[in-house]
Each structure stands twice: as structure tokens, then as C-alpha cells.
Amino acid sequence: MGLSQTELLLELEQVVQGNLDRHLSVAKEWFPHEYVPWSEGRTFKGVLDGDPWSPDDSPMSEVARSALIVNLLTEDNLPSYHHEIAVLFGREAAWGEWVHRWTAEEGRHGAAIRDYLLVKRAVDPVDLEGARMNHMSQGYANVNRESLLGSLAYVSFQELATRVSHRNTGRVTGDPLCDQLLARIAADENLHMIFYRNLLAAALELDPDQTMQAITDVVTTFEMPGADIQGFQRKAVEMAVAGVYDLRQHRDDVVMPVLRFWKVFDVEGLNADGEAARDELVAFLDRLDVQATRFEDKRDSLKARMAARLE
Ligand SMILES: [Fe+2]
Ligand SMILES: [Fe+2]
């Protein structure tokens, strides 16, 4: 019988405290307002009788707009994420301090990206607000709610996935200022990933079998937190084709580095359930590798066809 949820929370309390202290010592203070070129903004049509938005207001590509919208809507659901982790981690002592600090840091991300997009007129502000209302009204439910280990595994991958997505979105915008803002946000996501990754590493030592099963469950069912954004599938395909976030990056740059950090392939002394979970994980990663290659091949031939058409 593995440790209970309460036992895990108590056992990990010291690790949370240590990593919270570490986080606070390395996290750099930054100010979202400094990243937004306010003087480029113009009043919009509506109450203040400004200019209507037009797609010609910004030279940004369709895929860059899609990626920014997905990333922003994902950040926008912060109240739901806060609820989920506050319920799971509690609001006391080191766990609670992390919950609030993390929420405060994440709060900058959506605010900064929205300010940026509106000042630069990069997206339709009415559509954006509609999408935000729609997305937040659905809320976000943590599918690993019953499992502290599953939740810690999920957020380890998710924070890194978000980092990769922000970073590559910055690049495809072709806008150095936007790239700079998203790189700043991506640096926060990286520190969040490190926090959760270290916690799960400690859990893997405390209860390797249960933790291995949680890791396998999460990796084999992983979905991005914004997966229920309206029109997500189409945008996700666009983003994958543009190399903002594709299966190869998911496997090689998000899942594998974290698994290697945890040394999941080298853990010894697992019981039958733990070994079975690891076997399932390895088989899944092999299939993911095949799928990623297949996608890359398809994308290459699509690009070759498009290039031929332009000649
Ligand atoms: Fe964020
Ligand atoms: Fe984050």
C-alpha cells in the first residue's frame, strides 16, 4: 500500500519549503508595463468613438495570431487553475505560500500579453473578449484531482510545454518586442517547471511505485491546458505545422528531459505494478516517436508542395 494523499502532502512539506526558498531566491522581479509599447496604441471603436479594428492594423501572420490567442486564453483561465491547486495543495504553510506566489506570478502573463496585443492591434479585440468569456465560463477541471502525484507530474510537463509554446510563439511573430515579452514569460514558466519537477523527484524517492504509475498515466493521456478552447484543434494544427508546438517538441523537448531528470528509466527496486507502469511508458514513448516522425514527414512534403506552387 502506497502513501495516502495526506501522507504525501505532509512528507513533501519540507521539500516544498526548500524549493519555495530556492524559487524566491532565483525569480527575478519584472514589470509587464515595461514590455508594452504604449505610445503605439490607438483608441478603438465603441464607447470612446475610436477606430474600428481591422486585420490590416498589424502585419502579424495568421499562425502567430492563433498561437498568441491560444497562449493568452490558456493564461486567462488562471482563476480555475488557482482553485484546483488550492483545493489540492491547501492554503496553509509552505504549500499555501507556493499556491499564492505561483498565482501572483501567473497573473502577470495574461495581463502582459493582452496589453501587448491590444496596443499593437494584433487581434480583433471583440473576438478576443468573446473567446475569453467563452473559455473562462467553461472553467478548467484538473483530471488528476484525486491524485497529488498525478497533478505534480502533469504540471511539471505542462509548465515546460507552456514555456516551449511561448518561446516559439515569440519567434513566429517576427516582432522583436513580442519575442522579448514571451521570452520573459517563458523564463517564469521554466522556474515553475523546476519547482514541480523537484517535488515529483522527491516523491519518486518516497514512493517510487505509485509515482511511476502517476507519471505513466499523465504522459499517456497528456493534453494541453487550453485544449478545450473553441477551435483549439485547428489552431493546434496550425501551430504544429509552424513548429510552435508539435509532437516532436512535445516528446523530445518536454516529456523526455523531465523523465530523464527523474531518472525514471534507471529507478531500481520497483514492484510489479511499478515495472508494468514503466514498461507501458516506454512503449508509449516509442509510439509517440513514430507518430512524431510521421508528422514531420507529412509537414516536409506539405512545405515542399507549397514551395513548388510558389515557384
Ligand atoms: Fe503562465
Ligand atoms: Fe507557469
Image: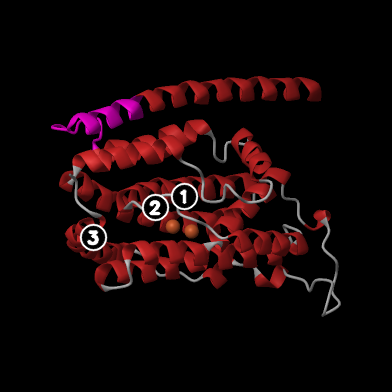
| Number of other residues with Cα within 10 Å of mark 2, as a class: few under 14, some 14 to 19, many 20 or more | some
Inspect the image, locate mark 3, and give the three-letter code of the amino acid beneath it: Thr
Mark 3 and mark 1 lie on one chain; the one further toward the N terminus is 3
Residue type of the residue flagged with mark 2: Asn
Residue at image location 60% in from the left, 49% down from the top: 228
Quarter in which the N terminus is drawn? top left
Q: How many marks?
A: 3
Q: Which mark is on residue 190?
A: 2
Which numbered dot is residue 6? 3
Along the horizontal axis of the image, is 168 left or right of 137? left
Camera-near label (3 vs 1) is 3
The amino acid sitting under disc 1 is Arg
Question: Whole-percent x and y of residue 28?
Answer: 37, 66
- Whether disc 1's CB lies below 8 Å from ligand 2 is answered yes
Q: Which residues are magenta?
A: 263-282
Q: Is residue 28 visible?
A: no
Q: Residues within 10 Å of mark 1 (few under 14, many from 20)?
A: many
Could you tell me residue 80's position as x and y percent?
A: 50, 63
Q: Position of residue 305 (x, y in %)?
A: 73, 20
- Is residue 82 rendered to the left or right of residue 45? left
Residue 59 x, y percent position in the rendering: 75, 51
State the separation of the CA atoms marked 3 and 1. 30 Å
- Give the distance between the C-alpha atoms of the residues marked 3 and 2, in whole angstroms: 28 Å
Question: Residue 156 colored magenta?
Answer: no
Residue on which disc 1 sits: 163
